[in-house]
């Protein structure tokens, strides 16, 4: 079975780090040889490095910027990351920094990513965030990320949530905007990132819309300031 590079991009606060980390866990539990690379050198507060112990305990290989989770203001990407991205032995999950600024770091590894037999770039979207609350705003950020990375987005990851207040109804309310953006960009919604409790309820009550294979079950792994 071919391996793949999965790039998780999106707006600041879209929840892409939690989605990326939990997606890596999903792959590993399917028996896949999995690695996660943190390419976020933009936001020092919400990094997949917070989940390092969990990931490595599960047998997921991890690579993080130098000085991640230290007092150094600007972490640095490493040469090891490019080699790992090119390694066909791994499914590689890339946690990318927010917006076009974060996507520029992804563009640095464009040739490494394109060298792989299979690669997918996801746009993670939470319709409840102020800068992706309508189609024009979400479309603009989507286009900026594509331009900055030098690669097209292949699919959406819906991450409609209100943190701990997320209910099944919260997730359902985000579907119209996600479908609008998917239709405009001619892509699919590959996954929905959903909290455990809401996922169980949606699978039971809306099995025509949600299946276990297209759900990323979200268990909080990243430290927050609130």
Image (cartoon, rainbow, N blue to C red):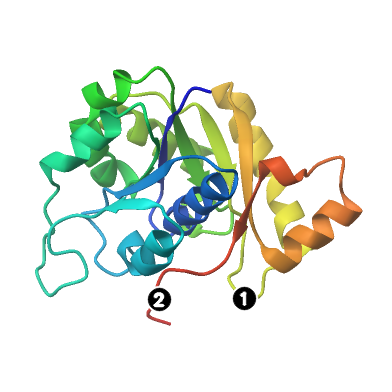
What residue sits 50% from the left and 49% below the top? 132
The answer for how far apart the CA atoms under marks 2 and 1 are is 13 Å
Left or right of 131? Residue 225 is left
What residue sits 78% from the left and 44% below the top? 210
Could one spot residue 134 in this view of the protein? no
Of callouts 2 and 1, which one flags the residue occurring earlier in the amino acid sequence?
Answer: 1
Could one spot residue 31 in this view of the protein? yes
**Where 121 sits versus 2, above or below?**
below
Question: In the rendered image, which quarter is residue 143 located in?
Answer: top left
- Mark number displayed over residue 224: 2
- Mark number displayed over residue 175: none
Single out the residue that lies furthest toward the right.
205
Q: Nearer the viewer, residue 188 or 183?
A: 188
Single out the residue that lies furthest toward the bottom.
226
- Near mark 1 (Cα within 10 A), the count class, few <14, some 14-19 or many ≥20, is few
Circle 1 is placed at which residue position?
Answer: 164
Q: Secondary structure at mark 1?
A: loop
Residue 103 placement (x, y as % from top left): 28, 40
Residue 7 placement (x, y as % from top left): 40, 38
Left or right of 86? Residue 25 is right
Residue 161 placement (x, y as % from top left): 61, 62
What residue sits 81% from the left and 41% below the top? 209
Q: Nearer the viewer, residue 164 or 84?
A: 84
């Amino acid at each position: 079975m071919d391996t793949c590079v999965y790039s998780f991009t999106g707006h600041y606060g879209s929840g892409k780090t939690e989605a990326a980390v939990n997606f890596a866990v999903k792959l590993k539990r399917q028996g896949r040889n999995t690695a996660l690379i943190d390419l976020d050198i933009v936001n020092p507060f919400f990094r997949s490095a917070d989940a390092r112990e969990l990931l490595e305990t599960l047998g997921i290989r991890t690579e993080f910027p130098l000085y991640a989770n230290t007092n150094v203001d600007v972490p640095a990407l490493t040469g090891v990351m490019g080699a790992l991205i090119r390694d066909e032995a791994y499914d590689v999950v890339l946690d990318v920094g927010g917006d076009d600024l974060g996507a520029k770091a992804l563009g640095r590894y464009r040739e490494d990513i394109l060298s792989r037999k299979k690669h997918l770039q996801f746009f993670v979207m939470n319709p409840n965030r102020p800068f992706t609350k309508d189609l024009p705003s979400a479309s603009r950020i989507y286009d900026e990320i594509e331009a900055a990375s030098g690669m097209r987005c292949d699919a959406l990851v819906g991450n409609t949530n209100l943190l701990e207040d997320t209910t099944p109804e919260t997730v359902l309310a985000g579907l119209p905007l996600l479908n609008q953006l998917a239709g405009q960009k001619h892509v699919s919604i590959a996954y929905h990132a959903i909290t455990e409790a809401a996922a169980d309820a949606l699978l039971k009550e809306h099995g025509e819309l949600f299946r276990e294979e297209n759900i990323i079950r979200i268990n909080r792994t990243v430290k927050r300031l609130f």
